[in-house]
Image (spheres, rainbow, N blue to C red):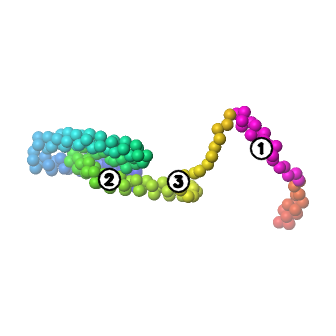
Amino acid sequence: MPILPLFLVIFIGVPLIEIYLLIEVGSAIGALPTVLAVVFTAVLGVTLIRIQGFSTIQKAQKSMAQGIPPAKEMFEGIMLLFAAICLLMPGFFTDAVGFLLLLPPFRTFLASLLISSAVLKSRFSHANRGFSGGDYFEGEYEDLTPEQQHERNKERLQHQHIIEGSVDSSDDSSDAASK
């Protein structure tokens, strides 16, 4: 998705939706209850994020202890951060998005979707660069001091086979003249 339309939606569309919803809710229940509802959702959201954030950190630590990369937990942590931002912004639309991201089944589904998308993009980008096979490259190396490198290079130069000869340019000049 192009970045400009995304920024337009975020910075123009979302505030317009928030203003509309605040006016509608304010006219239905009154100004003070609307303000109190916005403050209440922010406080409730921050409390829930603290609880779920600690849970996500514990899951990530458990995964790392088992030697499993905590990719899902990292994506869930990013989504919790986004949920916190949404819940701290005044408005009902962003609160709804924030609370939706607080639901563990939705967050797990979204994390799996993002991970599979990232893996596919990664595989296609490697394929376009000419990599073949898996994601791992095998090889061996030896850490040498400069003196050892010098000795190794001297050995290689002694074992090179030099082919002596000359270039015959008579065929090239006759080909060029005939064209």
Residue 135: assigned label: 3
Q: Residues within 10 Å of mark 1 (few under 14, many from 20)?
A: few
- Separation (CA) of disc 2 from disc 3: 25 Å
- Is 39 or 46 nearer to us in this picture? 46
In which quadrant is the N terminus drawn? bottom left
- Residue, disc 1: 156
In the image, what residue type sits under mark 2? Thr
- Separation (CA) of disc 2 from disc 1: 57 Å
Bounds of the magenta segment? 146-165
Sequence-wise first label, 2 or 1: 2
In the image, what residue type sits under mark 1? Arg
Sequence-wise first label, 2 or 3: 2
- Is 159 or 74 nearer to us in this picture? 159
Single out the residue that lies furthest toward the front: 66
In the image, what residue type sits under mark 3? Asp
| Residue 97 spot, x, y in % from top left | 26, 50
- Residue 101 in sight from this viewpoint: yes
